[in-house]
Structure formats: C-alpha cells, structure tokens
C-alpha cells in the first residue's frame, strides 16, 4: 500500500504542472485537514489552484519520497516565479489523504562546502533498522537542538563524514555549533519537537522555534549510517501570524 500511496502523492504534486483535476482525487473531500496557513481548506479549492498555477509553466521535481505507516513525506523542488525547496507531509486513512503539512523556503546555495539543498542519496535502505534510526534522531533533536547539550554532539553526528546541505552551514560540527550557540534572537533556537517520521536510514523531524528571533518551522531530514547522522537537508519557514491564516488548523 505504501508504494501506491507514494505514487498517488507524486501524481498530486505533479498536478501543479499539468492542472489535471484528477490529481486531487487522492484527497478525501470530507476529512481533509490543511496545515499550510496560506492555503484554503478543501479539495475543490486545491484543484482550482493547480489549474491556475499550471498556466504559468511551473516545474515540480520530487527528489525523495518516503512512507512511514499512514504518512507519506516528500522532499521537493519547485520552480514557479521563484525557485523553492519544500517538504510535504501527508497522512492517509485508507486510500485517501486526510491531512497535510508542508515547509517551503527559497532555494539558496551552494553552501561553503559546495553542497546544494537537494543533492545526495535518495533511496532508503536498512528498513529493518527504521525504529533505531528514529530513536537516534529523536534523541539528537531533543538533547542537542532543543536541550542545547552541545557537548554531546559527537554522540550523534559523525564529524568525519557529515555532509551538510543547509545553505548556511558546512561539512563540520563547528558551523552547526556556531549557529546554535548564537545569542538569543540571533541564531537558531529549537523549542519544541512536533513529529518524527522515518523510512529506513532517512528520518524527518518537524520542530518549532525561531531563526534570528522570527517564529519559524524547522523541517530537518537526516541520513543515518553506523548509528550516527552522516547527512542533513532542511528547510526553515517563517510561521504565518494567526491574523493572516486562511484556515484555522495551525502550522503544526
């Protein structure tokens, strides 16, 4: 079932290019919960949005797509009027998607190590170790990013092998430490972990906090090898103030 669900989400996202109204049939019209604060509720509204966007010759590339139980999550490249990188998360009940979250930012880079925001391995392996990888990354986010126990970084991240795709960082622990140790209101501040999704050696975390004092959502994708984090991709997006929401479901 996970392969079929992933295929239907690919079709849904590619519907932005084609405007094909059948692409949104994966959405349950009576149960769908939309967590993008700038998007209206409902399947019909989504179909109209796709039809309008398709006339602008958009390009959508699904770089990676994973499944975790009733969740499908994808790492995406969008080329509309601007180039953007996103993570899309869908929750299924049966054959239809009933809930959606996303996190999208302008494409930047390459970073100081020459990495762009999406390159690297795309296929998960070691499905039998999914839960141990999930536990490792959950502990990393809770202990290091939220708990700020920076002296323990070496327990979780392989400093000799880490490949960093964050446009503001590079391939070592020092740049991450610098960003996390910045004075309050200037750097990255993780405050709450909302969700951990895993498929084999890939783990996606959804967290809330601030970047340079701005309320933000952090989506971080990690690749694990030999019980250490060896690769990292991410997006950071400002959380829209509630006064500007087009639905009442919240970002998280």
Image (spheres, rainbow, N blue to C red):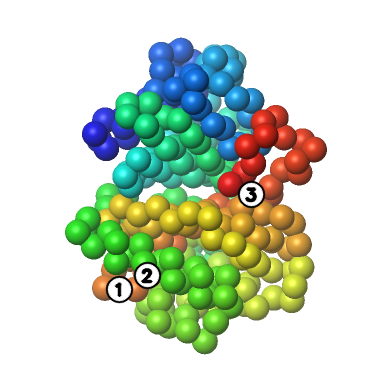
- Element marked by disc 1: loop
CB-based contact (under 8 Å), mark 1 and mark 2: yes
- Out of 252 and 3, give the one closest to the viewer: 252
Residue under label 2: 136
Q: Quadrant of residue 24?
A: top left
Q: Which of the two labelled residues, at mark 1 and mark 3, occupies the earlier sequence position?
A: 1
Q: In the rendered structure, find residue 124 and report the number of the disc placed on it.
A: none
Please tell me which of labels 2 and 3 falls first in the chain. 2
Q: Which structural element holds mark 3?
A: strand
- Above or below, 165 against 103 in this view is below
- Does 96 sit above or below residue 44? below
Residue lying at 36% horizontally and 62% vertically, measured from the top left:
134
Find disc 3 in the rendering and name its residue: 237
Question: Which residue is rendered at x = 43% and y = 83% of the image?
Answer: 154
The crowding category of the residue bearing disc 2, from other C-alpha atoms within 10 Å (few below 14, some 14 to 19, many at least 20), is some
Where is residue 176 drawn, in percent x and y? 55, 73
Real-space CA distance between mark 2 and mark 3, rounded to the nearest whole angstrom:
25 Å
Q: How many marks?
A: 3
Look at mark 1 in the image and give the residue it sits on: 227
Q: How many C-alpha atoms fall within 10 Å of the one at disc 3: few (<14), some, or many (≥20)? A: many
Instruction: State the SS at label 2.
Output: helix
Determine whether, in the image, residue 206 is placed left or right of residue 138: right
Q: Residues within 10 Å of mark 1 (few under 14, many from 20)?
A: some
Spot the residue most to the bottom. 151
Q: Nearer the viewer, mark 2 or mark 3?
A: 2
State whether residue 161 is above or below residue 71.
below
């Amino acid at each position: 079932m996970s392969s079929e669900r992933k295929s239907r989400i690919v079709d849904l996202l590619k519907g932005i290019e084609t405007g094909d109204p059948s692409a949104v049939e994966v959405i349950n019209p009576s149960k769908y919960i939309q967590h993008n604060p700038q998007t209206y509720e409902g399947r019909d509204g989504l179909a109209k949005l796709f039809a309008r966007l398709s006339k602008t010759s958009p390009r959508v590339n699904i770089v990676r797509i994973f499944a975790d139980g009733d969740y499908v999550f994808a790492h995406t490249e969008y080329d509309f009027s601007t180039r953007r990188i996103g993570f899309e998360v869908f929750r299924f009940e049966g054959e239809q998607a009933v809930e959606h979250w996303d996190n999208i930012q302008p494409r930047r880079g390459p970073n100081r190590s020459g990495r762009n925001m999406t390159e690297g391995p795309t296929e998960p392996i070691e499905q039998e170790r999914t839960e141990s990888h999930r536990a490792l990354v959950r502990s990393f986010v809770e202990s290091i990013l939220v708990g700020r126990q920076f002296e323990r970084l070496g327990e979780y991240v392989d400093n000799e092998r880490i490949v960093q795709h964050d446009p503001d960082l590079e391939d070592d622990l020092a740049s991450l430490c610098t960003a996390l140790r910045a004075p309050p209101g200037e750097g990255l501040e993780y405050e709450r972990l909302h969700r951990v999704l895993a498929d084999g050696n890939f783990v996606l975390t959804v967290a809330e906090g601030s970047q340079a004092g701005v309320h933000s959502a952090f989506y971080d994708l990690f690749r694990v090898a030999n019980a250490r984090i060896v690769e990292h991709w991410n997006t950071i997006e400002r959380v829209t103030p509630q006064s500007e929401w087009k639905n009442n479901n919240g970002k998280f």
